[in-house]
Every structure is written in C-alpha cells, then in structure tokens.
Image (spheres, rainbow, N blue to C red):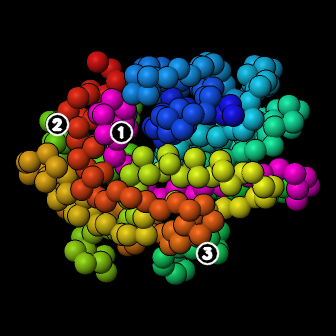
Amino acid sequence: MTVLVTGGAGYIGSHTCVELLNAGFDVVVYDNFSNSTPESLKRVMQITSKKLSTVCGDVRDKALLEKTLEGCDAVIHFAGSKAVGESVEKPLEYYENNVYATLCLLQSMRRMNIKKLIFSSSATVYGNPEFLPFTEAHPLRTTNPYGQTKLVIEEMLRNLHVSDPTWSIAILRYFNPVGAHESGLIGENPQGIPNNLMPYIAQVAIGRRQCVNVFGNDYPTKDGTGVRDYLHVVDLASGHLKALAFLDRPQCTAVNLGTGKGYSVLDVIHAFSKACGKEIPYAILPRRAGDIAEFYSDPSFAKELLGWAAKYDLDKMCEDMWRFQCQNPKGYEE
C-alpha cells in the first residue's frame, strides 16, 4: 500500500513516516518545505534503513499533485499553517494555506479516484470547554482563525462523505504533541521563537533562552498554572497507522488523540528539569487573554474504534525531547 503524506517533512509528519516505513508501507512525501527541511526526511531514512519518495511541491499545484497521486492508495494530510497567534495576524493566509489547499487536495483525489484520507485536525475545534474531559460529542466552536480553518475543513469532509459515501475519512483531533523520536535524530524544530511550551523549555535548558515565561499562576488548578493534555509524538504517529486500518470501510469519523491526563505548566517544567538534570528558570507573568485553565481529552473512543491508546508518560516525553535538543542544539541547522 502506498501512502501520500502531505507535509511529511514536518514534526508530526516525519515521525509518522517512520512508523509507516517500519510497518511496511510505501511512502511518498509531498512538501513545499516552507516550514520544514529535507534533512528530516534524510534522518527518517537513516532511522528506518528504508527509502521514501519525495516531491517538492505545493498542495495548491493540482497538476503536480495529481501526477504525484498516481499509484497512491491513501493520503495523510498534514500540510498547512498551524500557529494560533500568527493566524490572528494573518487570517487570509491561513484560509489560503489550510482551507483552499485542502479543497485542492480533495478535488485532485476525486479526479484520481483515491478516497481514503486521514486529516490532521486539532482539539482547538472544541473552543472553550462546556465540560471536561472533551469527548467527540462536545460542541464544535473555536476562538481563533487557525481553529476555524480546521473546523471548516472538518465540515467540508463531512459534506463530501454525505455526497459520496464511498469516501473513507478519519478526522484526528490532536491535543498537544511533544517529545521526539528516541534516536534523537528527529524532533520538533521550530523556526524562530517556539510557540509551544516544551520546545521553549528545551531551548532554555540548552542555553539558547534565559527563562520560561509562565502566564498565570492563579487558575483553579492544583498549582495555579494551566493544564493541558500532552501526548508523545510517537504515540500520535502510531495513531495514524491505526487509522489507516480503519479506512478499510467507508465512513467519516472524528477521533480524539490524547492521553486523557492533564499536566500543568509547572509539571512540565519540573519533569524537564528531571530529564536534563538541571533547574529550569521560570518567571510568573500575568495571564494571557484567551487562555483557559484546563484542556484535556477523553481518549476512550480512540481505544474503542481504533484500538489505540497512548503508551508514554510525561517523563518519557521530556527525556526524548532533551535527547533531541542535546544532539541538535540549533535544530536541523547543524
């Protein structure tokens, strides 16, 4: 079986390519490298001792995309823009890169008669919680343009399946992927200042930044800091393999991928301190507008439907992230 992976050179995409290759799939990566590097794919092949095919292209280039789709059986769609803050500043670019690009992909897949798709969605589609933990039945709404693009795409996929029930679509709603491959060869490689907590902590630990800013310590949580559901990226990648098996029967279903456990900001800082053997300096600052106290999943549907459950705990997430950071102090630049 041949799988086309859009955005396969990125953080989650590269880890998923490792899992696909190790499971015996043929992999074709389609990436424009706007927020990634071909180096990650060289390392994927180094880890697996297997080859993959790479096409440098934009999903909006339908001619090239359809040529690349020839001989493929399914698509895993990671490509897109993903920073919440940036989406507020550049909403039109986010609709272009996420919604329009996905429309181009679906049109090309339809023309090539490929109807198996795994879509990389996000727990941001739930917005502010009406109840916790989040189940797939939670009302869908969002508070930023990035989340809105995911919501629009989800609705587009549901409409497509209603119009043609022969499509088989898995919508995977990620919580907070962190960590790295245990080899230390691939991991999260943010450009500029990291938007996410763990890579920022890792850069403080390696000496690239002075301290971690903790926004708010007066939330109604165990230590006053915000609580999130952190998920090892290798666990997340394995969820895509489970979803591929699920695509054997036509349907369109959304599934949470999370641990079901909430870790606070201070939990993560202390666990990373343990992993790196040094204290992580941090400063308490006022809350940020729009932040909420707790945000974590109910992953029971993923276990029931896909037979998937996260295996790795926070200590493992931090250990693997620290190994990657030590081996790549400036990311893939070196």
Instruction: Measure the C-alpha gap from mark 2 to mark 1.
Output: 18 Å
Q: Which residues are magenta?
A: 162-189
Compared to residue 222, the image places residue 72 above or below, namely above
Q: Percent position (x, y) of residue 101?
A: 71, 36
Foreground residue among 83 and 198? 198
Amino acid type of the residue that numbered disc 2 sits on in the rendered structure: Ile
Residue closest to the far right = 163
Amino acid type of the residue that numbered disc 3 sits on in the rendered structure: His
Residue 181 - label: 1
Instruction: Measure the C-alpha gap from mark 3 to mark 1.
Output: 32 Å
Residue drawn at point x = 29 percent, y = 33 percent: 184
Label located before the other in sequence (3 or 1): 3
Q: Is residue 188 magenta?
A: yes
Q: Along the horizontal axis of the image, is 307 left or right of 246?
A: left
Amino acid type of the residue that numbered disc 1 sits on in the rendered structure: His
Q: Along the horizontal axis of the image, is 239 left or right of 99?
A: left
Q: Along the horizontal axis of the image, is 19 left or right of 116?
A: left
Q: Percent position (x, y) of residue 100?
A: 74, 39
Residue 138 - label: 3
Instruction: Classify the position of the N terminus by image quarter.
Output: top right
Q: Percent position (x, y) of residue 19?
A: 50, 39
Q: Percent position (x, y) of residue 51?
A: 53, 20
Q: What residue is disc 2 on?
A: 206
Residue drawn at point x = 34 percent, y = 56 percent: 312
Mark 3 or 1: in front is 1
Mark 2 or 1: in front is 1
Q: Secondary structure at mark 2?
A: helix
Q: Secondary structure at mark 3?
A: loop
